Image: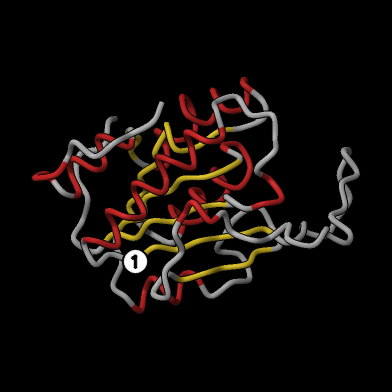
Amino acid sequence: MPVTVVDPTTALIVVDLQEGLAGLPTVHPFGDVVANTAALADAFRAEGLPVVLVSVAGTAPGRTERGEDAGDLPDGFTDLLRALGRQPGDKTVTKHTWGAFHNTDLADHLDGLGVTQVVITGVATSFGVESTARQAHEHGYHVTLVTDAMTDINPAAHDNSTRHVFPALGETGTTAEILALLCPRDHEAPVQG
């Protein structure tokens, strides 16, 4: 179902658009994802709506068949991309799992602001974005996923999330569609991709 509305108390959640992940070989151009997210962040700030910038700094404990362990991250790995235009009023969240809600104060922060809807962008579609969307849905927020402001390293995983998982968690739309609902008088903002 395409996105139908942006609630008056909506927050933008930007997942893992950080220096350490910027060089990934992604399905959709990483630069377009960042540009679209930055346009959304600017619009949310202009409307006085909260922007949450999330970075990942580790992995959940437990064995996996992939055997991944974040170990010591290189300097600057968790630094948010400058193109996002971080502002003093933005909320930052550092997570150590795929989803942005587990073991963070994100839900308390959003609830304290009276947020009823979250708009989610970032990387990777099938990991951080999907996990954050699932957790937001479980917390009772209306979830909107911006399909041209996210990407993945695996085309099939990206496609599965956007076509099959996201419609069960909320609504999907493009950056232009979200901007048109958010600020209808200025819906001609530049959008990449």
Asked which quadrant contains residue 66, the reply is top right
- Quadrant where the C terminus is found in the figure: top left
The answer to whether 150 appears left or right of 47 in the picture is right
Asked which quadrant contains residue 173, the reply is top left
User: The residue tagged with tag 1: helix, strand or loop?
Assistant: loop
Residue 116 lies, with reference to residue 133, above or below; the image says below
The total number of labels drawn is 1
- x, y percentage for residue 132? 53, 52
User: Seen from this angle, which residue lies furthest left?
Assistant: 185
- Quadrant where the N terminus is found in the figure: top left
Q: Residue at x 42, y 32 (%)?
A: 148
Q: Residue at x 48, y 37 (%)?
A: 33
Residue 156 lies, with reference to residue 111, above or below; the image says above
User: Disc 1 designates what residue?
Assistant: 50
Q: Residue at x 50, y 61 (%)?
A: 53
Asked which quadrant contains residue 151, the reply is top right
Is 128 or 25 nearer to us in this picture? 25
Callout 1 crowding tier (Cα within 10 Å): few <14, some 14–19, many ≥20: many
Q: Residue at x 83, y 59 (%)?
A: 73
The answer to whether 130 appears left or right of 87 in the picture is right
- x, y percentage for residue 189? 24, 39
Q: How is the image coloured?
A: secondary structure
Type of the residue with mark 1: Pro
- x, y percentage for residue 31? 52, 36
Residue 115 lies, with reference to residue 144, above or below; the image says below
- x, y percentage for residue 46? 24, 61
Residue 107 lies, with reference to residue 132, above or below; the image says below
The answer to whether 96 appears left or right of 30 in the picture is right
